[in-house]
Amino acid sequence: MARPLLLLLLVGGFGVTHLEFVCETVAVGNNLARGGKSSRSSSYSSVDESQAAIDGDRNTSYKSGSCSHNDFEMGSWWKVDLQELHQIAAVTVVNRQDCCGERLWGAEVRIGNSPDNSNPVCGTIANGTTNPVVTLCCCGMEGRYVSVVIPTRKEYLTLCEVEVYAAAPTPESGHGCW
């Protein structure tokens, strides 16, 4: 199982501008998203490439064919149906790097049992994030559906990979975060 480690980073050098919580996942279990079925709110091209975000390829160039890309729209979303209920330790999102990485700023990762993307928020991709790989700790949130939603603005949604890792229960906490 994936075992998350929560780190606190001070961002901004001597004049600390903000704190970021980062979750590193040691992937010792399976990426649950690989066995799921994905869907999205729209398609940028005529090809349905929603499954490209869970193909196991972390290539960050849209032209590689390994990224899902929605059209420019309000409330753009992508989701994976894990086919059964899981306790989720962490979700990793791989952003596009050939351009436009800022499009994911403010995107919410949601986990729950509702197929309509109204599930609780595990975490939000921070504005200003330049790292192409962002892992959010979800600390055992339960759900069948994991979605990435840009809720507050009209935007393209491009995801080069989404990985979902189950919580490994610990005797002390009963869930996968410590």
Image (spheres, rainbow, N blue to C red):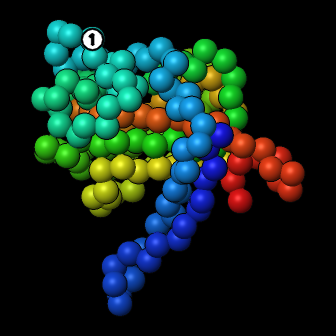
Quadrant in the picture for residue 93: top left
Neighbours of disc 1 within 10 Å: few (<14), some (14-19), many (20+): some
Measured from the top left, where is residue 47 in percent x and y? 21, 10
39 is higher (above) or lower (below) than 131: above
Measured from the top left, where is residue 108 in percent x and y? 45, 42
- Residue drawn at (44%, 77%), measured in percent from left and top? 10
Q: Is residue 29 left or right of residue 72?
A: right
How many numbered markers are drawn? 1
Measured from the top left, where is residue 127 in percent x and y? 33, 57
Looking at the rendering, in which quadrant would you find the C terminus? bottom right
Name of the residue lying farthest toward the bottom? 14
Res 122 seen here: no
- Residue drawn at (37%, 24%), measured in percent from left and top? 55
Q: Name the amino acid, label 1.
A: Asp
Q: Is disc 1 placed on a helix, strand or loop? A: loop
Depth check: 48 or 149 in front?
Answer: 48
Looking at the rendering, in which quadrant would you find the N terminus? top right
Name of the residue lying farthest toward the front? 28
Quadrant in the picture for residue 88: top right
Q: Is residue 171 left or right of residue 71?
A: right
19 is higher (above) or lower (below) than 56: below
Measured from the top left, where is residue 25 in percent x and y? 54, 51
Res 131 seen here: yes
- Residue drawn at (53%, 71%), measured in percent from left and top? 8
Label 1: which residue? 48
- Residue drawn at (31%, 37%), measured in percent from left and top? 58
